[in-house]
Amino acid sequence: MTDQGNEKKGLFYKVECREDALKLTKDTANVWYIISVINVVFYSMSKVPAEFYVFPALWVLMATGVRLLHSRVAAVLLLVAALWSCYATFTMATSGGGASNIEGILWSIAMLWASVRAIEATFLLTGQFAEPDQHR
């Protein structure tokens, strides 16, 4: 018998059962935690205004909602944040605003992919892989 846990790497596996969906919520939340920490470090090194620190804080809150509560709303809000980041990055890249590097574009795509996978996992956890009601 093959250990399927070793075959499921990162955010690129098919969700086949409840355990896969639970693992995916943890993995996507971890991606957003890492993104938030890196943004805080970047902001502190770049001396950006304090208002910018709100975004990573909100991302951590939404990722925690995905991880602990399996919240579909939090997953959709992460998608909105990722879409906004993609829009801002591509707009700056095409207008010559200094963010024309490939790292910013790849970073935005990673945010988008993590949020899409979070939506998939949370919807599966509340739908197809929902636990039976134990209060019956």
Image (cartoon, rainbow, N blue to C red):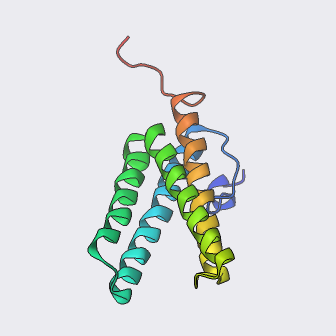
- Residue at the spot 59% in from the left edge and 77% down from the top edge: 104
Please indicate, yes or no, whether residue 30 appears anywhere in the rendered image: yes
Q: Quadrant of residue 128?
A: top right
In the displayed structure, 89 sits above or below 81; it is: below
Quarter of the image that includes the C terminus: top left
The picture places residue 66, in percent across and down from the top left corner, at 44, 47
Return the residue found at the far front: 95
The picture places residue 134, in percent across and down from the top left corner, at 38, 19
Compared across the picture, whether 76 is left or right of 17 comes to left
Give the camera-side residue of 13 and 76: 76
Compared across the picture, whether 103 is left or right of 135 comes to right
- Residue at the spot 38% in from the left edge and 87% down from the top edge: 46
Return the residue found at the far bottom: 45
**Numbered label tally:** 0
- Residue at the spot 66% in from the left edge and 44% down from the top edge: 15
- Residue at the spot 48% in from the left edge and 27% down from the top edge: 131
The picture places residue 2, in percent across and down from the top left corner, at 71, 54
Please indicate, yes or no, whether residue 110 appears anywhere in the rendered image: no
Q: Quadrant of residue 17?
A: top right
In the displayed structure, 68 sits above or below 59; it is: above
Give the camera-side residue of 43 and 19: 43
